Image (cartoon, rainbow, N blue to C red):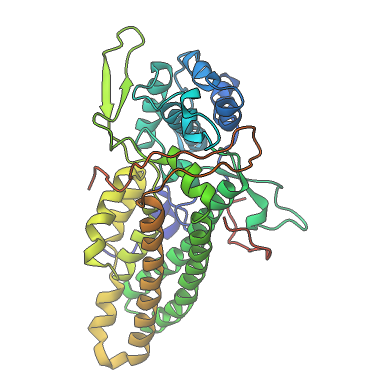
Amino acid sequence: MSFPADVESFTSTFQVNYQNGFLPANPPASAFKDSTYSIWLFLAKNIPFLLWTHPGEFRKQVDELPLLAFNAAHDENDLPQWRLAYSALSYIAHAYIWGARAGCGLHENPNDYENPIEVLPPNLAIPLRQVSDFLGIEPGLTFSSVVLWNWKRKLPLGPGVKDRASNLEVIFSFTGTQEEEDFIITSLMVENAGGVALRLALDASAAAGKKDSQSLEKILQQLRPAIDVARGEMARLKAASSSEVIRLRFKPYVVGFNNSHNGVFYPSSTRYSSRGQWLKLSGFCTGESSIFQALDILLGGQDLGRLQFAQTMRAAMPNAHVEFLDALAALPSIQSYVTSLGETNKPLQTVYNEVIISLKYLRDAHFDIIGSFDISPTTRAPAVNSKFARPFADRYPFKSESKKRVGFTSTEPRIIAPLGQ
């Protein structure tokens, strides 16, 4: 396959932003156009308050939700609305399933709080399945709902206001803590830095397709430091993921439903309680980020030992992003072109090898986080102070590495690539 003449149109076909990768071209929606769905927003934004300040109140309010069909337009203009609905409902679903007991401290009696349960109410399960089907994604919490579509600017861009990590905040949170916000925003910064590298890798593929070795060499010289920037953000994410609040208080709520015997039951009828489907879902995992697989495919630096794991991570990615990864495999191969030149172009061969080494370091750092955060066991933790009345503590030692288909707070402002307008 030759390289597309219009790369921006090519990437947008798969809901990928040429400038920022898998992040949306503009900030995600943080409010519904139709106030009918404001109750979803209220519940999702008040999870910490309702779970622990008023034990039992969260599930009660979810049980009393009216059954709503989401009626946003089926077009690109309303895509942010669909994503907002999905993020809100998936946060509500995980809080409902795991319950307040996951946030009970050592000084409290776990029996005072509700246990995890295995059945969602139909007034939550039905609209969650609806919006998930439209987006082509699992009907539960994923990397997309936690990171890609869960941020907003504190202040609009303008004179004196730049796109910095300090100007970003999350829309939804399980703990209401600064540690959780730092973890998510730092994950966002990794995606943003990776998006810059992806743009350069696409340009490099275009140069390889044209057999333009001079342009390719110049692009690869820019690509290596871009990958190193992403690795720097990954180091910050490692620090954020090692926070006790993240490991022991946030993590219990984002794990999937794939380790219990049946999974979670999603009813499809309000009248007949037995109608529905048991689902074993992936849950949130940093391995679900598409950016690393995209760079591997374009640059030809795949680690065959990790290839199967990468394939399983696609189960929780939006279908559009999975299709993009498949499309990348058909683009001109940078590796094949450099290899074809052999010793006749040593400078190009050298800079390409340097890029692959940098990519290996980035990938190793990513898998280090996957190993330490996503699939490592944890134990019950002591209570800590929070913005809200009830601190987090207990966790359930469920892993999230099984899929079904083929804080850090910096004192220095981090300027980022523009995240939309």
Q: Quadrant of residue 305?
A: bottom left
Q: Residue at x 47, y 15 (%)?
A: 63
Q: Residue at x 24, y 28 (%)?
A: 262
Closer to us: 103 or 366: 103
Name the spot of residue 351 as percent of width and height, x first. 39, 84
Q: Residue at x 26, y 86 (%)?
A: 341
Closer to us: 210 or 266: 266
Q: Name the residue furthest top.
A: 271
How many labels sit on residues?
A: 0
Task: Say which quadrant the N terminus sits in.
Answer: bottom left
Relative to 168, say whether 364 is above or below. Answer: below
Q: Name the residue furthest right.
A: 159
Q: Quadrant of residue 398?
A: top left
Q: Is residue 169 left or right of residue 20?
A: right
Could one spot residue 97 in this view of the protein?
Answer: yes
Q: Quadrant of residue 123?
A: top left
Relative to 18, say whether 377 is above or below. Answer: above
Could one spot residue 148 in this view of the protein?
Answer: no
Closer to us: 87 or 14: 87
Name the spot of residue 238 as percent of width and height, x first. 48, 61
Name the spot of residue 25 as percent of width and height, x first. 53, 50
Name the spot of residue 156 as percent of width and height, x first. 70, 48
Q: Residue at x 33, y 6 (%)?
A: 271
Closer to us: 14 or 389: 389
